[in-house]
Image (cartoon, rainbow, N blue to C red):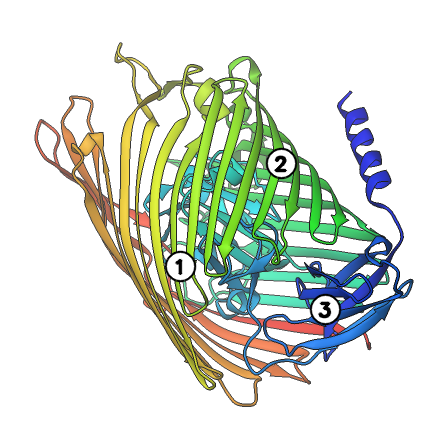
């Protein structure tokens, strides 16, 4: 039944938007497509003008219905980073327009939380963009590497569950992570493992701090991270081959291919990442070699191997674009145990195998020159299996242990999102309306009855009213029906005042997080645990207020920027794992009230060759456990880059100081314990050199140059019979150096 409904939807789109039209191709002097160019179409005979924009490949379809009695239309292209170009196109013919680059840099285009694509300064929400150049300058292999030095984001590490994060002082359960607008599933302990999100096929990363629940639903309470994949920019083909070696024992290889021929485009990538593990005391540089079976077999940072690949195809037929895609991921983590006493001839070993498959189909139709219909259909399958073995260290034979599937889990997500967007710069009123469906199934021995499912169905609308060119008012509303917690309304209001030099933004929004299948239905009982889910949980609801001020001063040779922002958020019905009233078991309850507030400042200065950014923030968190007492923690971030005049040599450095983190937890006897994690500093540096007309790139750098490994973490009792205790928390695997080599092959245009 569902398949028939989707088929009818596709056929209706095909019949409704396929009609005769002309095609306009916008590119720069080198022939590279200019995405989202601002275009004015003037029909001289009818004396009318329409303001539109090209799509992400620099293409604009002009419908035949636009022409009145005349056969020609005047085209004016006036977009950021280029000089204005005026030309005339004739009815029934395709046409190409090449733009000359302006002296100023081309402004970045963002899509996350916006009404379609738009400029960074024109966005109503404050969006932070990490472009491909920064990804390469950091030597970032995965999302953990990239976010490690970012302000307002703190990375945590579990050697089995992977890398987690918090944003604005709120844990990873409240952060929505997307790839091209599609949510990533497979949370362990509430977090998506950031080290599983590879960046070899990512063009840029867009970060919005603060709730975007109106746009993206559950888990977008603290913020949203949207990874935008690479797309073909040139006619012909581009091939990117990259290798990466890090002295700690990382050996990576990746290959990417993009191609565009007429109405067809394709993007394909594949990668293999291998990490041989690390533990304190290891040599700073190691190559694979044979060792005794029981020699240093236990490692703090576990051996990890990843294989990933993907394929995305696009076909444009008149006003319709059809985009099927497929992404595959497999990871194996090996946790080797200590040799067992008394003879040291055997050990217990674990293997954790993660598989992800993601298949999607996207349909994009331009109903009018400035009205876009976007249909996304997606299937995601996530499975994580734990296998436990008894290993004979004399023969290396392994025996699979019974009940090894205790931690095996599988989650399936069916995702459907449809949006209708009007984004016309000539209109004072624009909008985006749509619906999305999230239907999730969970399987596993720890799930009640071994299978549970949750349906989440929502309609939403975001509207932008611009009565003057210096004022944007953007309200939004989302209505959600969940099969468990029934209805929920999520309103939001965003305000933007000012133009490019002075910009003031404000946001008042509600956020929410629905309980996960684990929190609702998990049953985990063994000799050490008695944990039960709670099917009566309510969703977490947040109220958020935030404001930003941006000052930008651009001169011919240099530019200066300043940013100041502050926010406050409170979360009701926060879900916590707590002891049941009978004292014998643990379960999840809506008992917490959580508060977070902070202030941030950022100064940017630079010119054509160098750039310097310095930022500082101060975040405070509190809960009902701490009697609403706020615990504060500072952060300091600084980034420096310098490029030689030849344009082929670039130096970069990234520094971050993370202050001491304090939190308050309640003990079983109702006393309050203060928890802490010590402060630490991270420093990375790199030099990048291009050869052979920028087709061969070599980067040499150092990570964690201050050699931070584990930091102090523990508690100090404030009363009762609990004594102070201390431990450590892993941050990084020590100082390391790396080299990455990239080779680009481009077809002749």
Q: Could you tell me if the residues under marks 1 and 3 are in contact, i.e. CB atoms within 8 Å?
A: no
Q: Could you tell me if the residues under marks 1 and 2 are in contact, i.e. CB atoms within 8 Å?
A: no
Instruction: Quadrant for the C terminus, please.
Output: bottom right
Asked if one can make out residue 291 in the rendered structure from this viewpoint, the answer is no
The quarter of the picture where residue 328 lies is top right
Q: Which residue is mark 1?
A: 150
Q: Which residue is mark 3?
A: 33
Q: Position of residue 180 (x, y in %)?
A: 62, 49
Asked if one can make out residue 587 in the rendered structure from this viewpoint, the answer is yes
Q: What residue is at 55 percent from the left and 32 percent from the top?
A: 387
Q: What residue is at 73 percent from the left and 72 percent from the top?
A: 27
The quarter of the picture where residue 458 lies is top right
Question: Would residue 741 appear left or right of 323 to someone viewing this image?
Answer: left
The alpha-carbon separation of the residues under discs 1 and 3 comes to: 30 Å
Looking at the image, is 719 positioned above or below residue 522?
A: below
In this rendering, the count of numbered labels is 3
The alpha-carbon separation of the residues under discs 1 and 2 comes to: 33 Å
Q: Which residue is mark 2?
A: 434
């Amino acid at each position: 039944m569902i398949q028939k409904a989707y088929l009818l939807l596709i056929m209706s789109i095909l019949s409704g938007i396929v009609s005769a039209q002309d095609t306009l191709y916008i590119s720069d002097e080198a022939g590279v497509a200019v995405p989202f160019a601002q275009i004015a179409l003037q029909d001289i005979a009818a004396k009318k003008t329409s303001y539109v924009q090209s799509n992400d490949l620099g293409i604009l379809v002009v419908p035949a219905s636009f022409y009145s009695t005349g056969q020609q239309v005047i085209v004016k292209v006036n977009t950021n980073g280029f000089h204005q170009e005026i030309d005339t196109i004739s009815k029934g013919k395709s046409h190409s327009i090449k733009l000359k680059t302006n002296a100023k840099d081309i402004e970045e285009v963002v899509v996350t939380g916006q009404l379609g694509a738009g400029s960074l300064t024109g966005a109503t929400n404050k969006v932070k963009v990490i472009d491909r150049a920064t990804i390469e300058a950091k030597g970032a292999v995965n999302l953990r590497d990239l976010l490690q030095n970012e302000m307002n984001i703190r990375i945590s590490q579990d050697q089995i569950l992977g890398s987690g994060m918090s944003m604005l002082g709120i844990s990873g359960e409240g952060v929505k992570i997307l790839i091209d607008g599609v949510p990533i599933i497979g949370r362990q302990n509430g977090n998506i493992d950031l080290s599983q999100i590879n960046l070899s096929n990512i063009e840029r990363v867009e970060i919005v701090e603060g709730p975007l629940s109106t746009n993206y639903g559950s888990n977008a309470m603290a913020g949203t991270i949207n990874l935008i994949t690479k797309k073909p920019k040139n006619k012909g083909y581009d091939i990117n081959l990259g290798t990466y070696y890090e002295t700690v024992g990382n050996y990576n290889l990746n290959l990417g291919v993009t191609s565009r021929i007429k109405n067809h485009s394709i993007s394909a990538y594949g990668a293999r990442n291998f990490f041989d593990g690390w533990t304190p005391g290891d040599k700073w540089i190691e190559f694979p070699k044979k060792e005794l079976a029981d020699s240093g077999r236990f490692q703090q940072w576990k051996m990890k191997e990843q294989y990933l690949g993907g394929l995305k195809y696009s076909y444009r037929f008149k006003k319709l674009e059809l985009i099927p895609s497929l992404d595959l991921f497999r990871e194996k983590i090996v946790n080797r145990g200590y040799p067992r006493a008394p003879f040291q001839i055997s050990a217990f070993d674990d293997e954790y195998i993660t598989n992800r498959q993601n298949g999607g189909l996207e349909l994009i139709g331009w109903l009018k020159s400035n009205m876009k219909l976007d249909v996304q259909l997606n299937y995601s399958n996530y499975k994580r299996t734990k296998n436990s073995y008894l290993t004979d260290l004399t023969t290396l034979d392994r025996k699979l242990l019974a009940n090894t599937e205790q931690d095996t889990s599988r989650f399936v997500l069916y995702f459907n999102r449809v949006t209708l967007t009007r984004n016309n710069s000539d209109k004072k009123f624009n909008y985006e309306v749509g619906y999305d469906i999230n239907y999730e199934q969970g399987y596993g021995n720890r799930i009640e009855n071994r299978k549970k499912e949750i349906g989440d169905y929502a309609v939403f609308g975001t509207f932008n009213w611009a009565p003057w060119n210096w004022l944007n008012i953007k309200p939004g509303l989302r209505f959600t029906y969940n099969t468990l917690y029934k209805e929920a309304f999520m309103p939001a209001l965003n305000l933007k005042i000012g133009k490019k030099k002075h910009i003031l933004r404000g946001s008042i929004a509600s956020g929410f997080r629905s309980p996960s299948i684990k929190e609702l239905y998990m049953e985990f009982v063994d000799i050490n645990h008695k944990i039960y889910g709670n099917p009566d949980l309510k969703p977490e609801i947040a109220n958020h207020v935030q404001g930003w001020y941006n000052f930008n001063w651009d001169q011919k040779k240099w530019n200066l920027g300043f940013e100041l922002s502050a926010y406050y958020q409170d979360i009701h019905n926060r879900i916590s794992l707590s002891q049941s009233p009978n004292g014998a078991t643990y379960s999840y309850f809506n008992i917490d009230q959580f508060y977070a507030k902070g202030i941030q400042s950022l100064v940017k200065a630079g010119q054509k060759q160098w750039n310097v950014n310095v930022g500082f923030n101060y975040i405070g968190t509190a809960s009902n456990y701490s009697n609403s007492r706020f615990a504060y923690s500072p952060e300091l971030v600084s980034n420096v880059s310098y490029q030689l005049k030849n344009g082929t040599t670039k130096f970069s450095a990234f520094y971050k100081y993370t202050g001491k983190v304090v939190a308050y937890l309640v003990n079983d006897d109702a006393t309050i314990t203060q928890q802490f994690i010590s402060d630490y500093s991270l420093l990375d540096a790199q030099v990048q050199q291009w050869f052979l007309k920028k087709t061969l790139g070599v980067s040499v750098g150092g990570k964690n140059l201050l050699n931070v490994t584990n930091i102090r973490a523990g508690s100090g009792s404030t009363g009762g019979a609990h004594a102070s205790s201390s431990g450590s928390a892993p941050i990084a695997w020590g100082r390391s150096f790396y080299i990455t080599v990239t080779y680009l092959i481009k077809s002749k245009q």
